[in-house]
Image (cartoon, coloured by chain):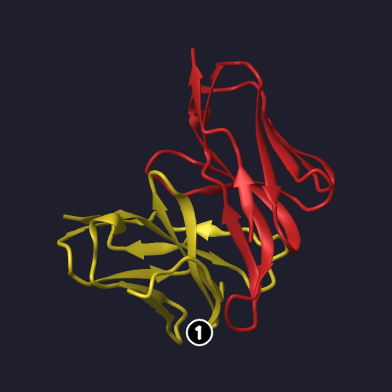
Chain colours: A red, B yellow
Amino acid sequence: GQNIDQPTEMTATEGAIVQINCTYQTSGFNGLFWYQQHAGEAPTFLSYNVLDGLEEKGRFSSFLSRSKGYSYLLLKELQMKDSASYLCAVRGWSRDSGAGSYQLTFGKGTKLSVIP
Amino acid sequence: DSGVTQTPKHLITATGQRVTLRCSPRSGDLSVYWYQQSLDQGLQFLIQYYNGEERAKGNILERFSAQQFPDLHSELNLSSLELGDSALYFCASSPRGGSNGELFFGEGSRLTVL
């Protein structure tokens, strides 16, 4: 099974930097994903880490430590439009049925509010 | 626009009823995933199909069933509906052998059971 923990809510100021942490326990780890989801909308892909280290993509960066079961998403130069839920998801192998497949298991998400 | 189409966008029905949610994946994607999202549970994986065959099953109730048709669209059937089934149901697709397993989500079908 897989267990994913991330803070429920965070608040940060426009223009600032915020770090959203995620810890996980899984079998057959095959990558960690971050998705952004605005209220009532579909999740959209932000980043992917499968090796230890930092992946940078514009204002967003994501870090992974496989030995610690830990990741974080770093958002720089926060904008009001960054107010959303950020979902940490772990990809692991599952053989619940059929031939088996990699599955994405999502955390409950961190609701980020950006204030002026 | 992710390219994944879900219908209906909104659905209101009564307890005990049966509904069908439909999903058309992105052109060329062979895998379809169904997720349920309720306020207190986050995104819960229900089931995955690959090229018409069930590939993986998550926390899907026996009252729920799904299938993927030869044209690769998928349907999720929810029966004997209960109040607790009220949720946003997302379909997602991914390309065969995708390099990073990224999922492309549809806009979701919001089900309200009264």
Q: How many marks?
A: 1
Q: Name the quadrant containing residue B4.
A: bottom left
Q: Nearer the viewer, residue B73 or B112?
A: B112
Extreme residue toward the top, this view: A116
Q: Name the quadrant containing residue B98.
A: bottom right
Q: What residue lies at 29% left-to-right and 55% top-to-bottom?
A: B84
Q: Chain of mark 1?
A: B
Q: Which residue is mark 1?
A: B52
Label 1 CA crowd tier, 10 Å (few <14, some 14–19, many 20+): some
Q: What residue lies at 42% left-to-right and 80% top-to-bottom?
A: B67
Q: Quick check: can you spot residue B98?
A: yes
Q: What residue lies at 61% left-to-right and 42% top-to-bottom?
A: A5
Q: Nearer the viewer, residue B70 or B65?
A: B65
Q: Amino acid at mark 1?
A: Gly
* SS for callout 1: loop
Q: Quick check: can you spot residue B27?
A: no
Could you tell me residue B78's position as x and y percent? Answer: 30, 71
Could you tell me residue A20's position as x and y percent? Answer: 64, 32
Could you tell me residue B38's position as x and y percent? Answer: 38, 50
Could you tell me residue A104's position as x and y percent? Answer: 60, 59
Q: Nearer the viewer, residue A14 or A52?
A: A52
